[in-house]
Image (cartoon, rainbow, N blue to C red):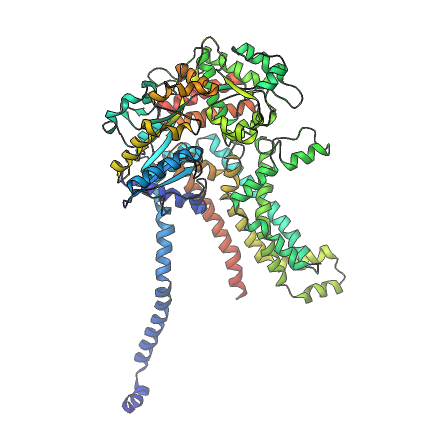
Amino acid sequence: MATITTERPRTTPEQAAHARKQRVRRQRLAPILYIGPAFLAIALIIGYPVFNAIGTSFLNASLLAPGQDTFAGLDNFTALFGDPTFWLVMGRTLTWAGAALIVQVGLGLVIANTLNKRLFARGAVRTTLIVPWVVPTVLVALIWRFLLDPVSGPINGLLRDTGLWENPPVWLADTRFVLPVLVLISAWKWTPFTAVILLAGMQQIPPEQHEAAMMDGANAWQRFRNVTVPGIRTSLALVTLTTISGAINNFNGIWLFTRGGPVGATEILTTMAYRTAFIEFDFGRAAAISVIIFVMMMAVAVVYFYVVEGRKGDKR
Amino acid sequence: MSTPSPRLSRRQLLALGGGVASGLTLAACGTGSGGGGSDPTGGGASGSGTLELWANAGVAGDSDSGLQRAVRAWGEANGVTVNVQGIPTQDLVPKLTTTSSGGSGPDVAIVDVSSVPQLAAAQVLADVTDKADAVTGDFGDELLASSSYDGGLFGLPYTTNNVGLFYNRELLDGAGIAVPTTWQELRDAAIELTGGDQYGYMMGAQGYGAFLFWPWLWQNGGTILSEDLTTATFADDLGQEAFAFYSGLVLEDKVMPPEFVGANASWDQYVAPFVQGRCAMMATGPWGTAPIEEGNPDLDWAVAPLPAGTGSASILGGTTISVGHNSTQSDLAWELVSWLTATEQMPYIQDTGNIPGRRDVIDSEWTAEDPVRQTFVEQMEVARARPALPIWGDIEWGVMANMWDAVIQGQQAPADALAAAAEETNQKLSS
């Protein structure tokens, strides 16, 4: 033992560098080993289907003719891009996402800002607020289908009884109203989530900043505009992007109410993909739509990482 | 990249799941509870004295339903556990098709006759031609034909039905109107009975309205497709004439309860205005009886044959019971199928108010015991089957359903819409 300790200082600089390198290499290797199993699982669970979807999108594949798939090249994509309905649905998907963004983030801001003040029974209000968010979408559909029932539903009943609207519309079957109504129903479910994230962001802002602004004579709007909003920029970016991606993927929020109807008035890309796959059984075409959705989601994800993660990096 | 092979379809399913579910949601949506392959009980076909039976929710019913009592009795006698899964009507075919393409699926399935060709082509149902040889004589030819595809028999007729004219006796008697027997009488009666919050007649939206149009087409001498099933003929002069009359009841005569445009989710939703006593007449099948008896037992109603055009016609419906293509216990499954369709078990079906597919029951005195049943049995003579095509579901619930919605939403003139639908159908037939 003693010999070793005496020998140690005698190691050459080269040897020392080598040992350091090894240690560093081991330190670099360890985390990879730690996350390896999880990474592999994710790669299998997410990567495998994604690559298969991409593969299927280049095939003529119909469930009505099992095992008779043929290579189709880009046919599924060119057929989609040449179909005016596809562009209509694409436009509607973007409208749907944009409307969700405006309503959910707008309302979320109002609610969060209100709850960020001293309020009577603030805790109770916050808890109640979150209820719609935890209601399963299937239940949300049942609740709203009942509320909006043209004959026995309370909403139309109220409109008739108060004389506000003599012949109220069949909300979920009227091409003029159905999309806005679905936007509002989805907002009913998802705004609480937005509000909670934004509220958390607002509570990170030191109260001194508000106090200082008040001392400088800023009114409520100015304080919101110049203290609150810059303070929650990261949360705002987060909810903006989750709302957009959530809306593009919000299949249940439409399918459970209208199945994309009437006359395609509420068809978005995900319902179109489902219809193509499971009603027309054209899996190749459906996979192509899925791939397009996938690309859109990737774009959202890239923006998300750039804005949110990149900003964090700056602070460090 | 994937190479074509019979195993491919399972991967495609995963693929789609992943692709759309980069949307993350698809796997869980649409099909409701108990999703196919991943469900420990839903995979079926695993041996050890368990059979998996899938049917639409109406046929499966609750634990006291005729079907469930029947399979329990058989299961106890044979030491087999039969799991009955009720699946919403609109989800049954997609769910069967996707689980089967993944190599699983139920051992026994009860499906609507109109989906037999599709499920046969997609290898969801097994060809039972040889197994059924001894019993085919028990069923009428027309019913066996609607359980067949491409020369093979893919199940046995379980129940049979057709569409009749349901009418509210109180409303008709009150207005001194006789039960209509012709188109014109129906139209006059419907106009007469419409006023205030009361309406004369109705159809459904979406596929419901499209489905109910076929009898009108046939009554006018028209046909859906050419005999060789390659061209749409429903938009010829006879078809256009029938469709003009049919859609005229909505657009010109306005005899429909306004909410019918939203009746796109279930037959229960469709019959609601009739059940509430707000609509005097409607066309529907025996499945319309249960919601009336449950929702408004006091309603005074009856069923008459559909009013005739230049001829009489109704639409043949019903269910077929068969063995799953992927069942690993197809012999045991077939035992259950043949037992369920044997004479002794008919009371289980009769108790539900449905008409069994067996000749000996249809010809028995039981049919005469109830006037409603009697009407449906009499109409069997003029009831016609829809084209036996694998893509039929896509035509009826896709092309025709959208066409009908465009008409009742006022987006397209009836004649243009029907012609466009015929063109679209031709494209689907040729592709």
Farthest-out residue, top: B310
Task: Pick whichever, B362 or A217, lies toward us.
Answer: B362
Residue at position x 50%, y 29% from top? B290
- Residue B134 to residue B66: above or below: above
Q: Position of residue A230 (x, y in %)?
A: 63, 58
Task: Pick whichever, B381 or B63, lies toward us.
Answer: B63
Task: Pick whichever, A112 or A17, lies toward us.
Answer: A112
Q: Position of residue B351 (x, y in %)?
A: 43, 29
State which quadrant residue B331 falls in: top left
- Tell me if A300 is positioned left or right of B112 in this view: right
User: Image quadrant for the N terminus of chain B?
Assistant: top left
Residue at position x 36%, y 64% from top? A32
- Residue A123 to residue A286: above or below: below
Residue A22 in sight in this render: yes
Task: Pick whichever, B208 or B244, lies toward us.
Answer: B208
Q: Position of residue B397 (x, y in %)?
A: 45, 27
- Residue A188 to residue B361: above or below: below
Residue at position x 71%, y 33% from top? A161
